[in-house]
Amino acid sequence: MRLTVRDTARILNVSEKTIYRWIGQGTIPAYRVNDQYRFNRAELLEWATSKKIQVSAEIFEEPAAEEGPLPGVHEAIAIGGIFYRVGGSDLNSVLRQVVQIIPLPEEVDREFLFQVFLARENLGSTAIGEGIAIPHVRNPIVLHVTRPMISLCFLERAVDFKALDGQPVFVLFTLVSPTVRAHLHLLSRLAFGLRAPGFKAAVLRQGSRDEILAEAARVETGVGKPAGAPAAE
């Protein structure tokens, strides 16, 4: 959600005049859209926390209706794309390559995104075992994209991501989301999908785009079903 100046003043328990002063000073993260200022909810929370500013509980409310329906793994991968033989000889160079090829708006600072991904890996590996990693930002805020996406990248050569199982990584699912809710939604859906034998097998054998998307769609039909219930054919 893009908060207005009035929303932000209410959440931070200050006057709108104070918000405009902070904007003028360049201290508060704000974006000018059609001659009006807008604020990203998660960025605002992070900023307020760093400044030790108490916030209203309203900041944690992110109505689903304002964001619209969230995509499943199938749609998110279709948006983010599947890429084969991605270059790079180590974690840094691989992440840099990934950031360059994923479909992002022109205004996105890809170097900044690379640094954010790198900082996240330095905090703890995003590798989940069996040669798979899920690079994402530490705080699920990331960029001003219109829809959440997952870019699936198969590496030309496996690289060390310091995975707990010791296996080098050759599959990357990179998550880019506009909101906290979307990020957590996709992360949970992807974790669910990677427990499905068909989808996971298609990924590990670097199947074709059509095959992987078909298996992802099959997984989506089983989301929310009771354990043991058959998925729709």
Image (cartoon, helix red, strand yellow):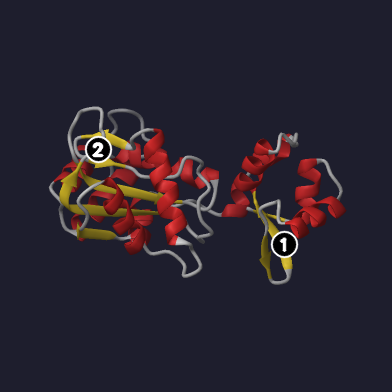
Amino acid on which disc 1 is placed:
Tyr
Q: Residue at x 34, y 46 (%)?
A: 220
Numbered disc 2: secondary structure: loop
- Residue 142, visible in the rendered structure: yes
Q: Is residue 150 above or below residue 134?
A: below
Pick whichever of labels 2 and 1 is earlier in the sequence. Answer: 1
Where residue 126 sits in the image (x, y, percent)? 34, 37
Above or below for 78 versus 59: below
Type of amino acid at the residue the image marks with label 2: Ala
**Which residue was labeled with disc 1?**
37
Left or right: 207 with respect to 223? left
Q: Is residue 122 left or right of residue 21?
A: left
Contact flag, marks 2 and 1 (Cβ < 8 Å): no
Residue 61 visible? The answer is no
Density class for disc 2 (Cα within 10 Å; few <14, some 14-19, many ≥20) is some
Distance of mark 2 from mark 1, alpha carbons?
A: 44 Å
Q: Residue at x 20, y 44 (%)?
A: 159
Quarter assignment of residue 226: top left
User: Mark 1: few, some, or many residues within 10 Å (few <14, many ≥20)?
Assistant: some
Does residue 115 appear to the left or right of 45 in the view shown? left
Tell me the tag on residue 196: 2
Image quadrant of residue 231?
A: top left
Q: Residue at x 58, y 53 (%)?
A: 67
Q: Position of residue 148 (x, y in %)?
A: 45, 54
Q: Position of residue 174 (x, y in %)?
A: 35, 50
Task: Provide the secondary structure element on which disc 1 rests.
Answer: strand
Q: Is 51 above or below relative to 208?
A: above
- List x then y, in percent, for residue 88: 22, 54
Most foreground residue, 29 or 221? 29
Q: Nearer the viewer, mark 2 or mark 1?
A: 1
- Look at 16% across and 44% down and name the residue there: 204
